[in-house]
Amino acid sequence: MKVPIKSIDTALPLPAYRTPGAAAMDCVVRTTTVIGPEEISLVPLNAALKPPRGHFVLLAARSSLHKRGVMMINGVGIGDEDFSGDSDEYHAALYNFTDAPVEIKRGDRIVQMLILPFDRVEWEEVDALDTPDRGGFGSTGV
């Protein structure tokens, strides 16, 4: 699948698969950002793109991100197919959970990007689901 992408800074690489079996592409940071203790910063990822119709962008933390003392504050990022303008650069919302400033440097790989298909649903409201209740969180044990 070919996806139109605009690099904000052409000196940096586009999101890229790092291994032949990688499911997601690593994204690089466009500008060095210092995140203060217990603060949140939007870190630019140097990419504006136009997902194909019926697809969305999923941003997730790389597995090593926590070692830097930061995490994606919203867990994952969702980019709708219509978030696709020339200035619609993707960002990662990072939270510094340490007591010291954390520097995220230009060119660092901090998040992964997937482009996935989606279906829109229409609700069919019913009085009952005709299936047994299973309980709630932790209902099958820890």
Image (spheres, grey):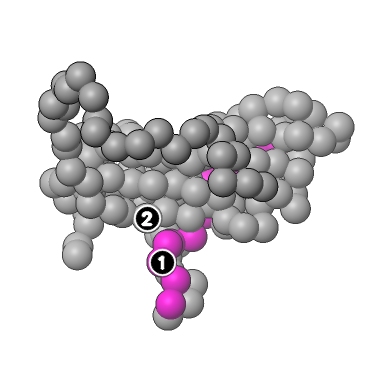
- Residue 109 numbered mark, or none: none
Of residues 96 and 120, the one nearer the viewer is 120
Q: Is residue 16 above or below residue 80?
A: below
* Relative to 11, 49 lies left or right: left
Of residues 127 and 18, the one nearer the viewer is 127
SS for dot 1: loop
- What is the number of callouts on the image? 2
Q: Residue at x 13, y 46 (%)?
A: 53
Furthest-right residue in this view: 99
State the separation of the CA atoms marked 1 and 2: 7 Å
Q: Is residue 33 visible?
A: yes
User: Identity of the amino acid at label 2?
Assistant: Leu
Q: Is residue 22 magenta?
A: yes
Residue at mark 1: 23
Among the 4 quarters of the image, the one containing residue 130: top left
Q: Residue at x 39, y 47 (%)?
A: 58
Residue 100, position as x, y percentages in the image: 85, 35
Among the 4 quarters of the image, the one containing residue 24: bottom left
Q: Is residue 27 magenta?
A: yes
Q: Is residue 4 above or below residue 17?
A: above
Residue at mark 2: 114
Residue 128, position as x, y percentages in the image: 23, 24
Of residues 58 and 12, the one nearer the viewer is 58
Q: Is residue 107 visible?
A: no
Residue 79, position as x, y percentages in the image: 33, 39
